[in-house]
Image (tube, rainbow, N blue to C red):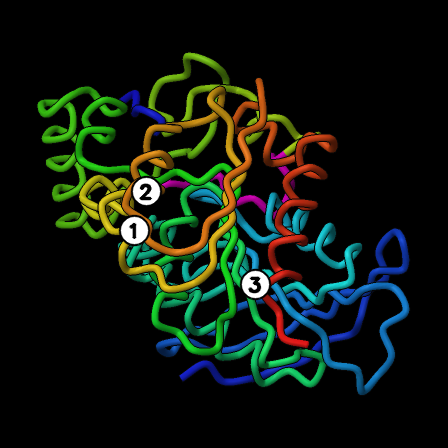
Amino acid sequence: MKALIGSAIASGLMASTALAGDITTRAVTFENNGATMAGTLYLPAGYEAGDTLPTVVVTGAWTSVQQQMPAEYAERMAERGFAAFTFDFRGWGQSGDLPQNVRFKEDPAAKTDDIRAAIDFVATLPEVDTAQISGLGICASAGYMVDAVSGNPMVRSVGLVAPWLQNEDLVNAVYGGEDGVAGLIEVSRAAEAAGGEIIPAAGPEGAEGVLMPLGGYYYEPSRGAIPEYDNQWNQASWEGWLTYHPADNPQRLDKPLAIVHSEAAAIPQGVQSFLAGYAGEATAQWLEGVTQFDFYDNPEDVTRAADTMADHFRANTTN
C-alpha cells in the first residue's frame, strides 16, 4: 500500500575516532532488556583524560539511525564544549538483532525505555559529569525524550528540535481522517499477527508500497540515505504510533525546556498545544521558512538550532 507520512550495563568499549575539528568519538555498547545496543560518545577538542563534561543525549527522527541527524547535532554539541551521546534504538541500526515482529518497529514505549537506559549508561562513563546530563530529541523522538526525562533526577534540562508532537486531531489530519487511521491500525494488527511485515521506509516521490514516498532527506545518498540507514519500516508499528499523543501531556515534563521549530516544518500546531499546557520554564525559537528536513542537515539551520540548544543547556547546568 502507499502509506502516509506522517538495567543499562556497560558491555564493551571500542577504539576512538577523530572527526573534523579534533572532535573524538568512541564507540560503545550497552544493554537494555537483554538487547545489546550500539552507541557513540562524542568528546570536544582538547578533552583531557580525567575531565568530566556536561553531556547531551541526542536522539533522532522515526526510522533513523545514530549516524543521521543525531550525529549532526552530537558533533555540534561537541563543538560547543559538551560531551554528546548517540545510539541506535533496539531493533534499528546496529542495536539488538531482534525477531522480525519487533525489528524496525516504531514503538514509542520501547524507544522511551531505550532513552532511559542510555541515560543510565551515560552516567557510568568517566567523561560525563553526572550532575549535568541533558536530553535533545529531534522530530519523532521529541515525545520519547520528554517521556524519558520526566521525573528523572539525573537529567537537568531538555531540548527539542523540529519536534513531532501529535495528538488525536493531528493524527487524523495527517493520516487520512478517522477512517484512514482505522485502516492503518487494521494493517498494524494484521502485520503483528503475521509476525511482522517489512516495507521500505523511504522512496522516490510518489512511490507505492513505501512509508515515505517523498524523495528528499531519507532517499538522497548525499543526505540521509547513508549506508548505515536501515530504510525499513515494520507495518506492525502503526497502532502504537497512531495512538501515541505526546502533545496531550505537557504537564508531565518537570525540566526546563527549549524548542526550535518553524511554521514551515511538520505539525507546528502540536508544539503550540504542548507549550500552552506546559507550566515550566520554556524557550521557544521559531525560525522562518525552515522545513522539517532542513532541520536534519542544512548547515545554517542546524547551526542556529544547535546554538539555541547549547545556550539552554549551559543556562541549566550547575556551577
Instruction: Name above or below for residue 252 compared with residue 188.
Output: below
> Going 30% across and 25% down the picture, which residue do you hit?
3
Q: Which residues are magenta?
A: 224-234
Disc 1 versus disc 3: nearer the observer: 1
Q: Of marks 2 and 3, which one's residue comes earlier in the chain?
A: 3
What is the distance, in whole Å, between disc 1 and disc 2 at their CAs?
Answer: 5 Å
Q: Residues within 10 Å of mark 1 (few under 14, many from 20)?
A: many
Q: Are marks 1 and 3 in contact (CB under 8 Å)?
A: no
Instruction: Give percent across and percent down for residue 178.
Output: 10, 25
Q: How many marks?
A: 3
As drawn, the residue found furthest toward the top would be 206
Which residue has dot 3 on it? 57
Which residue has dot 1 on it? 250
What is the distance, in whole Å, between disc 1 and disc 3 at their CAs?
Answer: 20 Å
Q: Amino acid at mark 3?
A: Val
Residue 274 numbered mark, or none: 2
Instruction: Give percent across and percent down for residue 165.
Output: 34, 40
> Going 23% across and 37% down the picture, which residue do you hit?
167
Q: Amino acid at mark 2?
A: Phe
> Going 70% across and 67% down the picture, which residue do you hit?
83
